[in-house]
Image: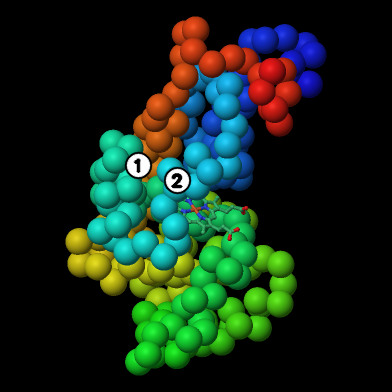
Amino acid sequence: MIEAKCPQTVSCSDILAFAARDSSGGSISYSVPSGRRDGTVSNQNDALQNLPPPTFNVQQLQSSFSSKGLSMDEMVTLSGAHSIGVSHCSSFSNRLYSFNSTYPQDPSMNPGFAAFLKTKCGDPTVPLDVVSPNRLDVRYYKNLRNHKGLFTSDQSLWSDPSTAYMVKENANNRVEWAAKFGAAMVKMGSIQVLTGNQGEIRKNCRMVN
Ligand code: HEM
């Protein structure tokens, strides 16, 4: 354990930033600057207020990302992280059932994919990218082109012409996307960080000291 070997030196925030990079399964490598300090307050609502919900359209996503200094291209690039991990059905079930008064389900979703998701919703979670769930890759963008994005926020990147060409570009340029992804992760990892005498180094990442 780091804290036992080297007390009050490495923050939980830095450990998380390294872990986020390393959990990409080695397919993407970039250097993560360190020096973040941990907050002395931990509140679930703070996170929720800063994270866009999966029901957002491109305009809403853009305003959320730009409020943190991130561009539209960085937003589309970072969304590629949805090629790994899982989601609860509640994050997209609005697209499957009673969508609106005209459509029983979201017409921007491939009907076969919608039927598949309905069979999966009995499980606790569904893979974000059903084709290659454990690999961080450009499959996410290819899925969007096939109308197999899980969230409204994902599929809108293809529906909206202001981002569709970026989806196309990323889908066809794995190496270029990986480089942009690393750079955007470093930028995102520098947003509103505590440094110097701010905050603290937590002894236990689950709680403030
Ligand atoms: C564009 C705006 C975004 C929205 C609306 C969004 C929304 C969501 C939602 C709703 C989930 C599933 C939560 C659940 O039901 O359990 C999720 C999972 C995830 N998101 Fe995002 N996200 C966004 C951007 C990002 C970014 C920028 C990253 C990282 C660079 C990211 C990485 C992930 C990962 C890795 C998971 C899977 C977590 C797991 O397996 O437990 N997302 N996201």
The three-letter code of the residue at mark 2 reads: Gln
Tell me the residue that label 1 is attached to. 180
Residue 5 at what x, y percent from top left?
Answer: 77, 11
Q: Who is closer to the viewer here, 162 or 193? A: 193
Q: Is residue 55 above or below residue 185?
A: below
Q: Within the image, what quadrant is residue 9 found in?
A: top right
Mark 2 residue's CB less than 8 Å from ligand 1: no
Q: Is residue 202 left or right of residue 131?
A: right
Q: Within the image, what quadrant is residue 120 found in?
A: bottom right
Residue 61 at what x, y percent from top left?
Answer: 32, 54
Eye-nearest disc, 1 or 2: 2
Tell me the residue that label 2 is attached to. 49
Q: Is residue 185 visible?
A: yes
Q: Is residue 155 above or below residue 104?
A: above
Q: Within the image, what quadrant is residue 109 found in?
A: bottom left
Q: Is residue 179 visible?
A: no
The residue under the point 58% across, 69% down is 90
- State how far apart marks 1 and 2 are (Cα): 26 Å
